[in-house]
Amino acid sequence: MRTYATAQRRLYSKAYKTERSRRADPMKTLVVVTHPGIDTSVVNRRWLEELRKYPDRYTVHELHKAYPDGNIQAEKEQELIEAHGHLVLQFPIYWFSSPPLLKKWLDDVFTYGWAYGSKGDKLRNRKTALAVTAGGTRLDFSEEGKLRCGLDRILSPFETTFRYCGSDYQDFYAFYGAEYETVENADYLKRLDRSAQGYIEFLSRL
C-alpha cells in the first residue's frame, strides 16, 4: 500500500510540474524585492509603484512581507522562479552588500541539484539582473571617490553567483545619493520619477 501511495504521489508531482511548466510565462519578469523598511522607503517604494502599473509584465515578490519570520519556503520560491522567464533582485545597499534576508534567500533557494550541479539547470540561460539603491553618490562609488570602488565591485558576488549557476546575467540598475535628498525637494522628486521610468526601460531590455 505504501508503495502504491508513493507511486501515486510521484505521478501527481510529475503531472503538477508538467502543468506548472505549461503555465510558465517566459516573457514575464519576477522581481524579488528585499527591503525591511519598504513602507518608509522612498526610492524602492517609488520603483514598486511603477512596476505595479504593468502586472502583465512584472510580478513583484516582497520577501519581508512573504516571510516576516524569515522562514523561507525554498520549493515555493523555486516554483515561482520557474514560472517566470527573467529574475531580478531589487534591494538597497546594506553595508556594501544586501539586506540579510536576501542572503538567506539565496542560500535556501539556490540549492544543489536545482540551481547548480550536474542536474541543477533551473537558472541556466535565464536572464538575471540587479536593481539597487545606494545612499552614497555616484562619485562616492568610484575609484576617485571616498569609497575607492564602484558598485560593480560591490555587486560582483551576485554577478558571480548568477554566472556560476549558468544564468545570463545582464547588468545592474542603480539609484545613487538616496541618503542626501529629501522628498521636499522638487528636483529630487523629478529625479525619482525619471529613475522609475528608467528602471522600466532597463527591465524591458532584458
Image: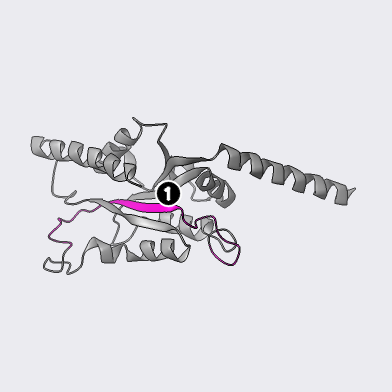
The three-letter amino acid code for the residue at tag 1 is Leu
Residue 67, visible in the rendered structure: no
Of residue 121 and residue 152, the one placed in the foreground of this image is: 121
- In the visual, does 187 lie left or right of 203? left
- In the visual, does 101 lie left or right of 202? right
Q: Is residue 163 located in the magenta-colored stretch of the structure? A: no
Where is residue 107? Give x, y as percent: 49, 61
**Image quadrant of residue 93?**
bottom left
Which residue is depicted at the point 86% across and 51% down? 3
Find disc 1 in the rendering and name its residue.
Answer: 87
Where is residue 190? Give x, y as percent: 14, 36
Of residue 142 and residue 128, the one placed in the foreground of this image is: 128
Where is residue 125? Give x, y as percent: 47, 56
Of residue 39 and residue 47, the one placed in the foreground of this image is: 47
As drawn, 113 above or below 74: below
Where is residue 5? Give x, y as percent: 83, 46
Q: Is residue 128 located in the magenta-colored stretch of the structure? A: yes
Which residue is depicted at the point 47% across and 58% down? 106
How crowded is the residue under tag 1: few (<14 C-alpha within 10 Å), some, or many (20+)? many
Q: Where are the magenta residues, as a range?
A: 116-141
Which residue is depicted at the point 53% across and 42% down? 83
**Magenta segment, prevailing SS (helix, strand or loop):** loop
Which residue is depicted at the point 9% across and 35% down? 186
